[in-house]
Image (cartoon, helix red, strand yellow):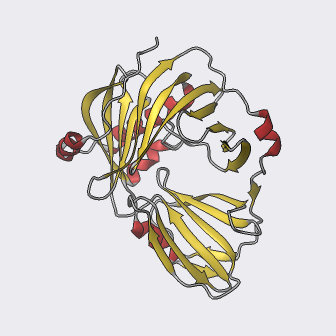
Amino acid sequence: MKLKPWLIGLALPALLVDVALASDLPAQEAGVWLQRVADSARRLNYEGKFVYQQGGSMQTLRIVSRAVGPHKETQLFALDGMPREVVCRGGESLIVTTEGGVVRTERRPSSRHFPDLLPVNAAALVNWYAVRLGEMDRVAGLECRWLVLVPRDAFRWGHHLCVEKDSALPLKAMMVNEVGKPLQQYVFTEIRFGGNPRPASHARAQATAEPVVRTPTTEVITVRQLPPGYTRVAAVKRRLPNRPNQVDQWVYSDGLMYISLFIEPAVRPVETVKGESPHGMLNLLTRQVGSWQVTVLGDAPWPAIEAIATNLVER
C-alpha cells in the first residue's frame, strides 16, 4: 500500500498540554511499549520520505530499509541541499557527500537514525524516563498514537513519538527541552511497508572511506562518575577537520541521548571554553586535564555535559 505524500505541520503545542495531564504508565507496561517500538524499526521492510527540522533548518530525505536477519540495512538520500547519502549496516554508518564534483566519505560508529530511535534494550529506559500515552493522531495518511517519554532528571531531554497503530513504527518524532520547546523533529510524508527494498551499496565509498579504528586499551583519562543511566557505548579514533592526527572519541549514552568526549594532546595551555549552539541543542565544554585537551559535546542538556567534563582526571 503506497500512500500519497503530504506534508503536515511540525509544531505540536496542543500535544504538550495534553500529555502533561496524562498519567505515567506502570513500569512493566511502559517497557512493553518501548520494546515494541524499538523492534519495529529493525524487523520491518519499508521505504518512504520524511522531513527533518532542527532550529531554522529543514531537510527532506528518502529512506529505504530492510531487515536482514536480526539486523537491518538502511540507506538515506538527501533530496535537497548538498547531495548526501548515508548507508547504515553492521552498527556503522557510511556518509557520502558530493560537493563541486568531489566525493567525500566518512564512517561513524553508529547506525541509528529516524525512525530507528530507541536502543535494542529499550525497556530499560523506564529507569530514566516516565512513559505516558497521548491521543491518536494521523501522519502520512496512517493512524498513530503518541507515546511520550518524560525525563526523570535534568540529564536528559523529553521525546514524543507518534507510533503507527499496527506496527508501532514511529511516523513522527520530536525531542523537547526542559521547558517543552521542540529541539528537533521528524515526520514521514509518505511511507510504504512490505516488499523487499534493497539499499544500493556505494562501491566507491566502500573502497575509499577511512575505517573506524577502535581505541587501544591503554586510556589516559578516567571519568570518575557518569550521570545516572549513561554508559560508554563506543571508543574509536577519528580524524577531525583542522587536526593533523587522529583523536580519541568516546561516546556515552543512556540509549537516547549521546555525548562525545574527544581527547588529544594539549600542545599549549588550554583555555576552558563553554559553548551552546544558537538553537540551544548542542552544548560543549573544552578544558585541560593534565597533559590532555578534552572536549565534551553532545545534543544533550548542559547538566549532563558538565557532569562528564568536570569528572575527568588523568590516569
Residue closest to the far front: 100
Instruction: Tell me which residue sits at (63%, 37%) in the image.
Output: 85
The foreground one among 248 and 207 is 207
Q: Is residue 121 above or below residue 288?
A: above
Can residue 253 be seen here?
A: yes
Instruction: Tell me which residue sits at (71%, 69%) in the image.
Output: 243
* Snapshot quadrant of residue 215: bottom right
Residue 44 image offset from top left, x and y in percent: 54, 24
Residue closest to the far top: 1
Residue closest to the far right: 207
Q: Is residue 177 above or below residue 19?
A: below
Residue 162 image offset from top left, x and y in percent: 35, 33
Instruction: Tell me which residue sits at (49%, 28%) in the image.
Output: 49
Can residue 168 be seen here?
A: no
- Relative side of 145 to 196, left or right: left
Q: Is residue 188 above or below residue 113?
A: above
The foreground one among 84 and 49 is 84
The foreground one among 26 and 293 is 293
Instruction: Tell me which residue sits at (62%, 20%) in the image.
Output: 197
Residue 144 image offset from top left, x and y in percent: 33, 26
Residue 288 image offset from top left, x and y in percent: 60, 83
Q: Is residue 182 above or below residue 294?
A: above
* Snapshot quadrant of residue 179: bottom left
Q: How many marks?
A: 0
* Snapshot quadrant of residue 37: top left
Q: Quadrant of the C terminus?
A: bottom right
